[in-house]
Amino acid sequence: MKRREFITGLGAAALTVAARPWAAEAPQLRIEERRAGKLGSGHYRIGVLVFDDYETLDLHGPVEMLGHLADVEIELIGPGAVARSFQGPKVVVDRPLAQLEPLDLFLVPGGLGTRALVQQPELIELIRRQALMSERVLSVCTGAALLAQAGLLDGKRVTTNKAAFAWVASLAPDADWQGRARWVQDGNLTTSSGVSAGTDAALALIAEVRGEAVAQKIAEIAEYPWNRDADNDPFAITWGTDT
Amino acid sequence: MKRREFITGLGAAALTVAARPWAAEAPQLRIEERRAGKLGSGHYRIGVLVFDDYETLDLHGPVEMLGHLADVEIELIGPGAVARSFQGPKVVVDRPLAQLEPLDLFLVPGGLGTRALVQQPELIELIRRQALMSERVLSVCTGAALLAQAGLLDGKRVTTNKAAFAWVASLAPDADWQGRARWVQDGNLTTSSGVSAGTDAALALIAEVRGEAVAQKIAEIAEYPWNRDADNDPFAITWGTDT
């Protein structure tokens, strides 16, 4: 599914975005240019959502792998100047979330902090708009809860953290929830399972946009036993979502 | 090997430390108190070295796992106010490296930035002293280069990143280098292989200090296929260090 279809599929939401200044023609053209063939080798711009009590590996696992791409730019974007992970360490926010910009990839991690975020309509609206301005969207873990609350998952095949499955799924009852999947790709939307699953999903995405050999090389540099099989999800059994 | 034996094993280095104010009695007593039995369930203090061009997952993989321990405190310590990872995102330094403090665990990640750090004797000396003030030391990837340069690996069984093996090993020719090992524990020193190997080493350390069930539970929360076998190192073959 191309970005335009992704937007069309959202109906009214897409119309709202089209009427706003941040969905102006210039960014659209830049996305079209990238789609014309530069994606595989040209500049690749990634924005990563950060917020207090994000889960460390949700964010940094994919960043590790994506950050080895040639000509890649990774920005952390969020509502504050700094975001403290659930585990303690803090990251510096590079760009305010309110400053929406076209991205090749919008990465949405999860963590305990999503429980507070889903109750903040203004932030959810900004997340929705940033997702709509992005060529691809990748959620990790309960990052799917933010996309669900933003209405971006309805009608799509998706998955999320297995330990928090019932809560996240309750936010988007019209999505096609997969209780057993390391990650699921539906068009330009990839949703991955809990925490470490995001690392595998990121490698799968790299394989698609830059080729299998690039992904393999990055996994070797990171000495990471890459799980290439999206259907291999032993934690669905651990957490009882494999029904 | 207990901390005192670790220090004794370093000979002259230990004597130097004893003569300095930061190796005063009070911190020593705190370490003795912890050794008396609080380690398994009490407050656990972790300091993580950060520096520009650290490798993202070297740091955040172990932090993900260790950060789920009950009553844990994780501080980032480094020479600057902020450290930019090789992949781009920046972390906030919580404590200057010059302010040495007793730690339960000193975590030393690697990355391209170690090539510059090994040429800075003052920083290497601070790293050496912080290691000597710590109950345990865990290096990930080329973090072992910093410990090697500090003279902390001589006579010990150790490993490091497989892609940079020759360079790191050249810094400590008197260490017993293991070309095939996901991680190696020698007394209170654990050295792990490249990048993602640190995550497995951290779980092994958690199993030792808090019990196997705690480590297993954390791996399940993170939906992480934990490699429990330190001898399972397929990347030794990939990178040709399995000789």
Image: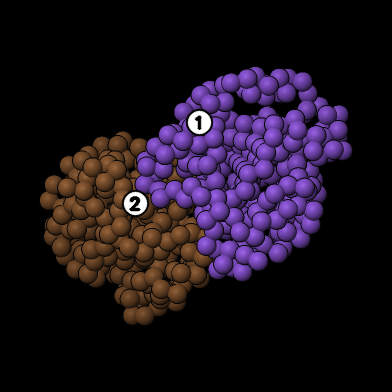
Chain colours: A brown, B purple
Cα separation between marks 1 and 2: 28 Å
Residue at 80% x, 34% y is B8
Q: Quadrant of the C terminus of chain B?
A: bottom right
Q: Is residue B194 left or right of residue A12?
A: right
Residues at marks 1 and 2 touching, judged by CB atoms closer than 8 Å? no
Q: Which chain contains the residue that carries disc 1? A: B
- Residue A182 in sight in this render: yes
For mark 1, does the 10 Å Cα neighbourhood hold few (<14), some (14 to 19), or many (20 or more) residues? some
For mark 2, does the 10 Å Cα neighbourhood hold few (<14), some (14 to 19), or many (20 or more) residues? many
Q: Quadrant of residue A120?
A: top left
Judging depth in this view, the residue of B19 and B2 nearest the camera is B2
Q: Quadrant of the N terminus of chain B?
A: top right
- Residue A158, how many percent across, how many down? 22, 55
Residue at 44% x, 48% y is B226
Which residue does the numbered mark 2 point to in the structure image? A140
| Amino acid on which disc 2 is placed | Val
- Residue A183, how many percent across, how many down? 30, 57
Dot 2 lies on which element? loop
Dot 1 lies on which element? helix
- Farthest residue to the bottom: give it: A37
- Residue B213, how many percent across, how many down? 42, 34
Q: Is residue B86 left or right of residue A158?
A: right
- Residue B87 in sight in this render: no
Judging depth in this view, the residue of A141 and B197 nearest the camera is B197
Residues at discs 1 and 2 both on one chain: no
Which residue does the numbered mark 1 point to in the structure image? B210
Residue at 33% x, 80% y is A36
Residue at 34% x, 51% y is A140
| Amino acid on which disc 1 is placed | Arg
Q: Which chain contains the residue that carries disc 2? A: A
